[in-house]
Amino acid sequence: MNLAIRWPRTLASRLSLIFLVGLILAQALSFGAQYYERYETAKNTMLGNLETDVSTSIAILDRLPASERASWLQQLERRNYRYLLDEGSPGTAMRDTPIAVTSIKDAIGKDYPMTVTDIPGPIKHFQVHLKLADGSPVTIDVRPSMVPLSPWLPVVLLGQLALLIACTWLAVRIAIRPLTRLAQAVETLDPNAHAVHLDEKGPTEVAHAAKAFNAMQARIAAYLKERMQLLAAISHDLQTPITRMKLRAEFMDDSVEKDKLWNDLGEMEHLVREGVAYARSIHGSTEESRRTDMDSFLDSLVFDYQDMGKDVQLGGKSEAVIDTRPHALRRVLVNLTDNALKFAGAAELKVENKNGSLSVKVMDRGPGIAEEELAQVMEPFYRVENSRNRSTGGTGLGLAIAQQLALAIGGSLVLSNREGGGLCAELKLPIRPAGQ
Amino acid sequence: MEHVDHILIVDDDREIRELVGNYLKKNGLRTTVVADGRQMRAFLESTPVDLIVLDIMMPGDDGLMLCRELRAGKHKATPVLMLTARNDETDRIIGLEMGADDYLVKPFAARELLARINAVLRRTRMLPPNLVVTESGRLLAFGRWRLDTSARHLLDEDGTMVALSGAEYRLLRVFLDHPQRVLNRDQLLNLTQGRDADLFDRSIDLLVSRLRQRLLDDAREPAYIKTVRSEGYVFSLAVEVLGAPS
């Protein structure tokens, strides 16, 4: 058996619980105190009335001729006690004396000796037996009951409860909302994209947290920018020495060493270019967006490959004209296609226009990428072990650049392994991209 | 005496300009090397040259400014080959819009520079003089189309970009440079072969049909590129040269 009460998980429910339980307890306490106070007052008044009433009634009965007594009983009857002109019902001796009996005794006990019997039953019921001056028996039949509560009281109590719940909900909501917003902002924080500036208004603590968050965001962006500028600067400055080396190499006599040097320089050049391209893809492009006919765009891309003798095929028609940055888009597709050609020797492009978004798939039948590495390969300088390793060349930036540029043009890039082997890189573009 | 082409090399890096100068000299060209725009202007005052190799990234007046200056002055007919450190389409386009005839990305191979220099010299000499200034950075208008010669794509009436493959662009340029003239397949092949000549293996007929598709030209009743039976093709519309694209 699980006795432990589960502490609710969310801050909202915890706060609500604390508020609600606290307020209900406080409310119950004050209600109880007031109720008790009222009860005491009512009882004292009632007992006072009882004393006067009983002594008056008994005096009346005592002075009336025995024949007239019965007709007066009706008038002397009260809500919870009445008079009987007989010995009463049989009962048992009273264990503890109710206060009503004490009051009766106080009122008439001096003049009339009395016995009290308890009538057993589900409801409290007792009788006081006494004898009038002429010796005839009188029984006071008492069915004590509390003063009834007003019928509107439960309604008021329920109303109060509802008010409590509503106030608690409102208070918790107000307290939690900035926190939720902060959490959302942190969740969607992407230092490469445009920063989400949090509202620095609201309660002091929240404003403080928002300020701290904004500052942190600015710092991250600054670090990233610095990193990119460093990468761009190094890559850029390397171009001059590489140019010199290439020029010098051309003065060398033809030899194996010259060819090797030439290849090394080519590799360095490629690295430097990719480095610059990656830095620029993050920095954002100055290229303007323009209306582009997608089918001719893809055709020309594929024809350029085919004209170079590469096995690149295009399937499907988009029949779409979209606003995009053509050079960035071309770079994304070229990087993906080059990748496919590198690892599979052939690439297959497929374009689809489905419900408001354009999908361009670049597929190959190469070795693919292990599932657990699919997300990582788009990180800069990441290289897949085994099949797609360094020996096949490449800087580890091609996919990172493609990914960055895809984001920059409002699209998304997803890699997946194909059934039957090979990689599928799917670029999704909105047909109507939102703003710039 | 045979004319030896005189090449002026403007680059702020001493080693690069000297290495380039020596390489070109070794390959039979006459070269002069200068370090910046000031020296370039001073030299051009006294000596006309056949081609200028201009580095874009230079302290002081950069290559783009110098190129624009050349185009505006009395050296507007001198071909310019730009050297850029950034392999970026927009840089290339800006360079061409400033009036450069070709561009080369650093780091480059000296033999490629030599090939480009020769290609530019050959091209500028071949073209009729009225087309020399329209070589780059201009829009060519024909029918419902405009061809942006620096970005190398077509624009329709709405300004929608219609991309061209490299081979398609070169073929279209040949037609637009020789409008209303019948060109046979050999001529087309020769004129279309750009610097990627070795990579070009499509038959002219296939290319023409692709280009017609691109221009939305009906192959049976073509309005732009007409087939001349047993002779070749003719671009049948007039070509208008517009200013630089906005």
Image (spheres, grey):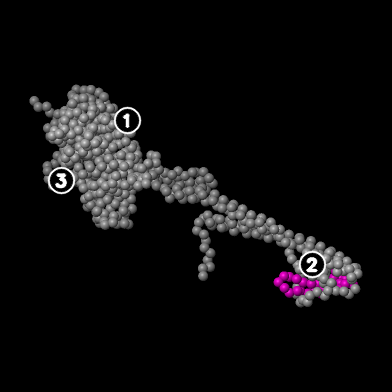
In the rendered structure, the answer to whether residue A187 lies left or right of residue B18 reads right
Check if residue A119 falls in the magenta segment. yes
Q: Position of residue A385 (x, y in %)?
A: 27, 56
Residue farthest along the left direction in this orientation = B1
In the displayed structure, A306 sits above or below B145; it is below
Q: Which residue is mark 2?
A: A81
Q: Which residue is mark 3?
A: A259
Quadrant where the C terminus of chain A lies? top left
The reply to whether callout 3 and callout 2 are in contact (CB within 8 Å) is no
Q: Residue A174: in sight, yes or no?
A: yes
State the residue in front, A377 or A356: A356
User: Which amino acid type is shown beneath numbered disc 1?
Assistant: Ser
> Which chain is indicated by disc 1?
B
State the residue in front, B161 or A255: B161
Q: Position of residue A124 (x, y in %)?
A: 73, 70
> Which chain is indicated by disc 2?
A
| Label located before the other in sequence (3 or 2) | 2
Q: Residue at x 31, y 32 (%)?
A: B157
Q: Position of residue A420 (x, y in %)?
A: 26, 57
User: Which amino acid type is shown beneath numbered disc 2?
Assistant: Tyr
In the rendered structure, the answer to whether residue A411 lies left or right of residue A129 reads left
Q: Which residue is mark 1?
A: B246
State which region is magenta. A108-133
> Mark 3 or 1, which is nearer the eye?
1
